[in-house]
Image: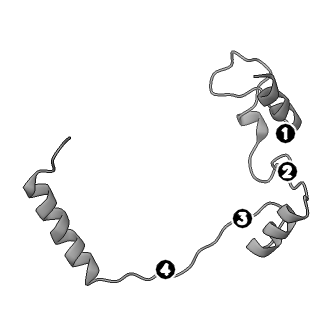
Amino acid sequence: MTTKSPRKTESQNMLNARMANRPIAVVGMSALFPDAPNLNQYWDNIINKIDSIIDVPESRWNIEDYYDVDSEALDKHTVKGVDSYRTLILIQ
C-alpha cells in the first residue's frame, strides 16, 4: 500500500478549497449524431433499429489520405467500407 505524501495531500486540499469558492458554469454543449439532428432522434433511431452507418462523406475528409489497398502502407488502413470492417472483426 502506498501512502500519499502530506505535502501533496495538503496542496490538493488547498486547490479543492479554492475551486469550491469559484463555481463554473457550463455555457453550452454540442454533438453530432448519425442520421439525427438531436439526441432524442438519435435514441429513437436506435430503438427503431435504424442503421445510420454510412461511409464518411467526402466533404468531411479525403478517404485517400487514410486508405490504401496495400496492407504494408505506412499510416494507412486497408478497411474502406463498413461491411469490410464488420467482416474483419468477425474473422479475427
What residue sits right under mark 4 in the picture?
26
Q: Which mark is residue 53?
A: 2
* Distance (Cα) linking label 1 and label 3: 19 Å
* Distance (Cα) linking label 1 and label 2: 8 Å
Quarter of the figure that contains the C terminus = top right
* Distance (Cα) linking label 3 and label 2: 13 Å
What residue sits right under mark 1 in the picture?
82
Pointer 1 with pointer 2, Cβ within 8 A:
yes
Judging depth in this view, the residue of 49 and 60 nearest the camera is 49
- Judge from the rendering whether residue 21 lies leftward or rightward of residue 30; answer left or right: left
Q: Which of marks 4 and 2 is nearer the N terminus?
A: 4
Instruction: Classify 10 Å Cα crowding around label 3: few (below 14), some (14-19), many (20 and above).
Output: few
What residue sits right under mark 3 in the picture?
32
Type of amino acid under label 1 = Val
Pointer 4 with pointer 2, Cβ within 8 A:
no
- Judge from the rendering whether residue 12 lies leftward or rightward of residue 72; answer left or right: left
SS label for mark 2: loop
Type of amino acid under label 2 = Ile
